Amino acid sequence: MGIADKLGNAADEAKGKAKEAMGDATDNPRLQAEGQSDQACANLKQAGENVKDAFGK
């Protein structure tokens, strides 16, 4: 996995955490859910990259 992919996934996860925190602070359940969804997507992408690395592709 390239460094750009790792950084991109980390950035996506950080954005999701920020959205979730903003949703918590403003009592906005939609924003909280959106942040959690963004984090889940980043984690799925990371898992896919790990599978690629495991198989050397």
Image (spheres, rainbow, N blue to C red):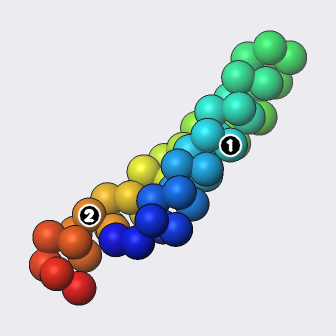
Q: Is residue 57 left or right of residue 23?
A: left
Q: Quadrant of residue 2?
A: bottom left
The residue labelled by disc 1 is 15
Lower position in the chain sequence, tag 1 or tag 2: 1
Q: Position of residue 19 (x, y in %)?
A: 73, 34
Question: Residue lying furthest bottom in this view?
Answer: 57
Residue displayed at 25% across by 75% down: 52
The residue labelled by disc 2 is 50
Quadrant assignment for the C terminus: bottom left
Q: Amino acid at mark 1?
A: Lys
Quadrant assignment for the N terminus: bottom left
Q: Position of residue 16 (x, y in %)?
A: 64, 41
Mark 1 Cα-neighbour bin, 10 Å: few <14, some 14–19, many ≥20:
some
Q: Is residue 2 left or right of residue 32?
A: left
Helix or strand or loop: what does disc 2 sit on? helix
23 shown above or below 42: above
Residue displayed at 13% across by 78% down: 55
Question: Residue lying furthest right in this view?
Answer: 26
Q: Amino acid at mark 2?
A: Asn
